[in-house]
């Protein structure tokens, strides 16, 4: 089975990541230097994010996956 792409969910996740990153005053470059994840393509909704990557992002910002998704309806 191939990947299923849900554009609306991908947009909400990307927007939430950007919101959290900007709230913490972290640039995309600093984020990459800190944990090695190119976040620009994710925020631009050009890449489908894996749960492992999302978990790494949440750990970086010291939040759980449930906290991350609590702002997404």
Image: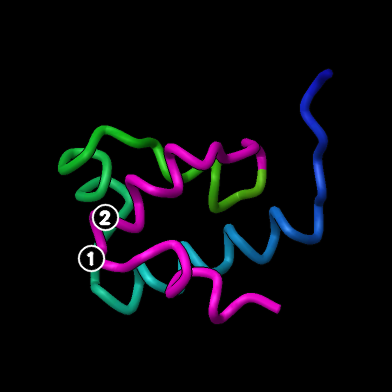
Task: Give x and y (percent) for residue 13.
Answer: 60, 60
Residue 15 versus residue 72: which sits nearer the camera?
72
Residue 3 higher or lower than 25, as above or below: above
Q: Label 1 vs label 2: CA separation?
A: 5 Å
Query: Is residue 70 in the magenta section?
Result: yes
Which residues lie in the magenta part?
46-73
Q: Locate the C terminus by quadrant.
A: bottom right
The residue pinned by badge 2 equals 59
Q: Is 49 displayed left or right of 12 in the figure?
A: left
Specify the color scheme.
rainbow
Q: Is 29 displayed left or right of 12 in the figure?
A: left
Task: Give x and y (percent) for residue 16.
Answer: 52, 69
Q: Is 44 displayed left or right of 26 in the figure?
A: right
The image quadrant that residue 1 belongs to is top right
The image quadrant that residue 21 belongs to is bottom left
The residue pinned by badge 1 equals 62
The image quadrant that residue 69 belongs to is bottom right
Residue 9 higher or lower than 31, as above or below: below
Category of crowding for the residue at label 2, using alpha-carbon neighbours closer than 10 angstroms: few (below 14), some (14–19), many (at least 20): few
Residue 3 versus residue 43: which sits nearer the camera?
3
């Amino acid at each position: 089975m191939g990947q299923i792409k849900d554009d609306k969910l991908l947009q909400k996740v990307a927007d939430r990541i950007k919101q959290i990153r900007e709230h913490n005053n972290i640039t995309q470059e600093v984020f990459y230097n800190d944990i090695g994840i190119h976040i620009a393509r994710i925020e631009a909704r050009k890449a489908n994010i894996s749960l492992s990557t999302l978990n790494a992002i949440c750990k970086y910002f010291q939040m759980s996956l449930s906290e991350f998704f609590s702002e997404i309806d």
